[in-house]
């Protein structure tokens, strides 16, 4: 029978769970004391490789990494992750500890004692993509509104309260369920199951101390009470990235075909005036909205120009995006420094998305793509209207 004392659960004599608040000085001390006194053979930490790198080597976010993010189309996910991190970081600053301090303490204490470390969390990008895909439009708006614009009066929250609501991705533990129930399932319930499955996978490595957010403590303990084969059997499914909906790609592929068909029809019927109007509509709407997106992101004038010029062309090719070109231009004309990377990862102010060079590259890419997509859809609708008139 598991015994729970002060956010410590002994599942059995060879497995102990420690629940922590990511901004708590008390949690840092708790982790160090548990490693020293309990003497585990292995310390399992609620991190994935990318989150661990962000904690231990924040200065490594350089131009090469940003270029990779742009090319892989991950700018929107990075912005969402950063907004989530900023929400908790602001609370961490008021509490005297930086978010993730207790995870770093676990890693440092384990290294000092020459104890192996195991990372047991799901990749943060997979988690974000699954949460984003699960939410409807209304839920997405509610989440972004809560993270980016709602004023928060929780800065004086006690450590005891925070121990129940601690994880980087599920900082708004109960709010997530109220605002976006389907996202709450991914951020909380799925990760409870994933953490438990990973712990079961490494049970054969000896006496294990697992450091997890207090918000996951009871959920992980519950799953560890289930048959190990059942718990580990879910890992493969939980690692899957969501399938992208096919309708946006179908629409994007249909628009160039529609435009080509319209051009052929107008040429065949000698409707040169309509042909000119169609071309102008396509060029103007694509260029205008893509350029506007980059402008809202406060991109460099050259980035605005590149995004505007690229959009009418990239909208004809589903494998390209105007925001990529605008973001790459922004990266070259206003290259981020190491200090920019450190300041952005600190993200103590949301204005860094626009003021900081790293944030601006990501915003230029994301909003440039959004503007280009809207331009293509509106232009496609206008062309359909022209053909039907």
Image: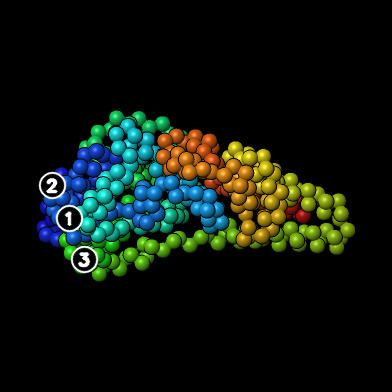
Local packing at callout 2 (Cα closer than 10 Å; few below 14, some 14-19, many 20+) is: few
Is residue 100 left or right of 363 when viewed as pictured? left
Describe the element under mark 2 as helix, strand or loop. Answer: strand
Q: Position of residue 68 (x, y in %)?
A: 53, 55
Q: CA distance from mark 2 to mark 1?
A: 11 Å
Task: Identify the coloring.
Answer: rainbow
**Residue under pointer 2:** 5
Q: Position of residue 183 (x, y in %)?
A: 39, 50
Left or right: where 292 falls relative to 24: right
Mark 2 or mark 3, earlier in chain: 2
Question: From the image, which quarter does the N terminus lie in?
Answer: bottom left
Select label 2 or label 3 by which is in front.
3
**Mark 2 vs mark 3, CA separation in Å:** 25 Å
Under tag 1, what secondary structure? strand
Q: Which residue is mark 3?
A: 205
The residue wearing badge 1 is: 16
In the drawing, what numbered circle is on residue 124? none
Q: Are marks 2 and 3 in contact (CB under 8 Å)?
A: no
The number of numbered discs placed on residues in the rendered structure image is: 3
Circle 3: element type: helix
Q: CA distance from mark 3 to mark 1?
A: 14 Å
Query: Which marked residue is nearer to the observer: mark 2 or mark 1?
Result: 1
Q: Residues within 10 Å of mark 1 (few under 14, many from 20)?
A: many
Q: Earlier in the sequence, mark 2 or mark 1?
A: 2
């Amino acid at each position: 029978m598991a015994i729970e004392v002060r956010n410590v659960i002994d599942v059995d004599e060879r497995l102990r769970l420690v629940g922590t608040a990511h901004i708590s000085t008390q949690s840092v001390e708790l982790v160090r004391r548990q490693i020293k006194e309990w003497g585990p053979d292995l310390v399992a930490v609620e991190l994935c490789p990318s989150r661990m790198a962000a904690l231990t080597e924040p200065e490594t976010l350089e131009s090469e990494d940003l270029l990779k993010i742009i090319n892989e189309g991950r700018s929107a996910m990075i912005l969402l992750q950063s907004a989530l991190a900023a929400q908790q970081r602001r609370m961490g600053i008021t509490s005297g500890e930086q978010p993730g301090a207790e995870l770093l303490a676990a890693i440092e204490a384990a290294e000092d004692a020459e104890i192996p470390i195991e990372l047991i969390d799901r990749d943060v990008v997979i988690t974000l993509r699954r949460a984003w895909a699960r939410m409807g439009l209304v839920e997405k708006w509610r989440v972004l509104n809560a993270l980016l614009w709602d004023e928060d009066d929780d800065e004086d929250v006690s450590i005891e309260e925070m121990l129940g609501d601690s994880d980087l991705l599920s900082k708004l533990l109960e709010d997530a369920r109220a605002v976006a129930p389907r996202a709450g399932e991914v951020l909380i319930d799925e990760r409870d199951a994933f953490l438990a499955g990973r712990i079961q996978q490494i049970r054969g490595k000896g006496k294990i101390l697992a450091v997890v957010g207090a918000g996951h403590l009871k959920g992980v303990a519950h799953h560890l009470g289930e048959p190990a084969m059942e718990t580990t059997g879910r890992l493969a499914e939980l690692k899957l990235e969501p399938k992208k909906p096919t309708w946006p790609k179908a629409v994007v592929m249909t628009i160039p075909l529609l435009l080509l068909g319209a051009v052929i029809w107008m040429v065949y019927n000698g409707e040169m005036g309509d042909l000119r109007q169609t071309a102008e509509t396509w060029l103007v709407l694509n260029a205008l909205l893509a350029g506007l997106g980059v402008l809202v992101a406060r991109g460099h004038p050259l980035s605005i120009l590149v995004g505007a010029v690229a959009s009418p062309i990239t909208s004809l090719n589903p494998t390209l995006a105007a925001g990529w070109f605008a973001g790459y231009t922004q990266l070259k004309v206003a290259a981020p420094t190491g200090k920019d990377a450190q300041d952005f990862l600190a993200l103590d102010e949301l204005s860094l998305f626009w003021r900081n060079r790293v944030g601006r590259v990501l915003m230029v890419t994301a909003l440039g793509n959004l503007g280009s997509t809207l331009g293509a859809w509106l232009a496609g609708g206008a062309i359909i209207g022209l053909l039907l008139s």
